[in-house]
Image (spheres, helix red, strand yellow):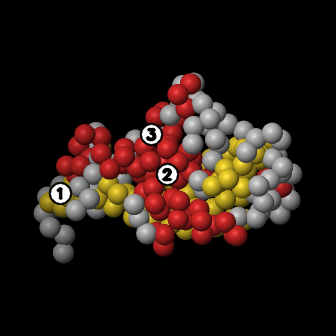
Amino acid sequence: MIRPYFWGVFVGSCCKYSKATNNTHFIFLSKDKLMQANAPFRIGFGIDFHQLVPGRELWIGGIKLEHHKGALGHSDADVLLHAICDAMLGAACLGDIGIHFPDTDANYKNIDSKILLKKSNELINNVGYNVGNIDSTVCLELPKIKPHSAEMQQVIAGILGVNENQVSIKATTSEKMGFVGREEGIAAYATVLLTAKQ
C-alpha cells in the first residue's frame, strides 16, 4: 500500500509521490542540504587512465611496483587511487579530483596520491558519509597485480579507516588489445558505496 505522501532520496534528489494527483516530483538538493536529506547510502563510479613511459616510477594502490615503465602524470599518477577518489567524490556529488586537486596547481606536482585519497575521504566525511566498500579493477599487461593486492588493500583501508575486506582490488589484461595491450598505458575502474554517518 502506498502512503498518500512518500519521500525517498535517490543520489542527490528527493522524490515526492502524491496519491491524490498520481504524480511524482523530483527535487534536486544542493550539497549543503545533502546531510539533511540523510540518504542512507550513495554509489559512485570512477575511472582513470595514464600513459606508461620510461623514467617514471610506477605507483599503484599506494605502493611502488618495480617495472621498466611508470605512469605519467602531474602527481605520482597512481591510477587506482585516482579512480577510487573520483568514485568517492562522485558518490557524494562533490565533483572529481580534477576540481579539488587540479593539475594546474603546483602544490600537487608529484604529490603522493595517498594524500589525495586522505583529502577525498575528509571531503566525504564533511558531508556526512563514510566509505562502505570499494570494488576496483586495474587493467594492465605488466606487472602482475595479484602478488601485491593484499598490501594495496592494507594501505587503502588504513587511509580510509575501514577493514581490508571492504576494499576489493582485481586486475585484468586487455588480451594484448589497445593501448593497454601494447603496454602504452594503464587504466583503473572503481565503484564505491558510501554510507551515512550514524
Q: Amino acid at mark 1?
A: Ser
- How many neighbours does mark 1 have within 10 angstroms: few (below 14), some (14-19), or many (20 or more)? some
- Residue at 76 percent of width and 41 percent of height: 56
Q: Percent position (x, y) of residue 129?
A: 32, 54
Answer with the quarter of the image where residue 113 lies: top right
Does residue 88 appear to the left or right of 138 in the view shown? left
Q: Which mark is residue 95?
A: 3
Q: Nearer the viewer, mark 1 or mark 2?
A: 2
Q: Percent position (x, y) of residue 48?
A: 62, 47
Q: Nearer the viewer, residue 100 or 63?
A: 63
Residue labelled with disc 2: 87
Q: Percent position (x, y) of residue 71?
A: 72, 44
Counting residues from the start of the chain, the first of labels 3 and 1 encountered is 1
Name the element at disc 1.
strand
Does residue 41 appear to the left or right of 109 in the view shown? left
Q: Is residue 22 visible?
A: no
Name the element at disc 3.
loop
Whole-angstrom CA distance, mark 2 to mark 3, is 9 Å
Q: Amino acid at mark 3?
A: Gly
Q: Percent position (x, y) of residue 43?
A: 42, 58
Does residue 198 appear to the left or right of 192 in the view shown? left
Q: Amino acid at mark 2?
A: Ala
Q: How many marks?
A: 3
Residue labelled with disc 1: 18
> Mark 2 and 3 residues: CB-CB less than 8 Å, in contact?
no
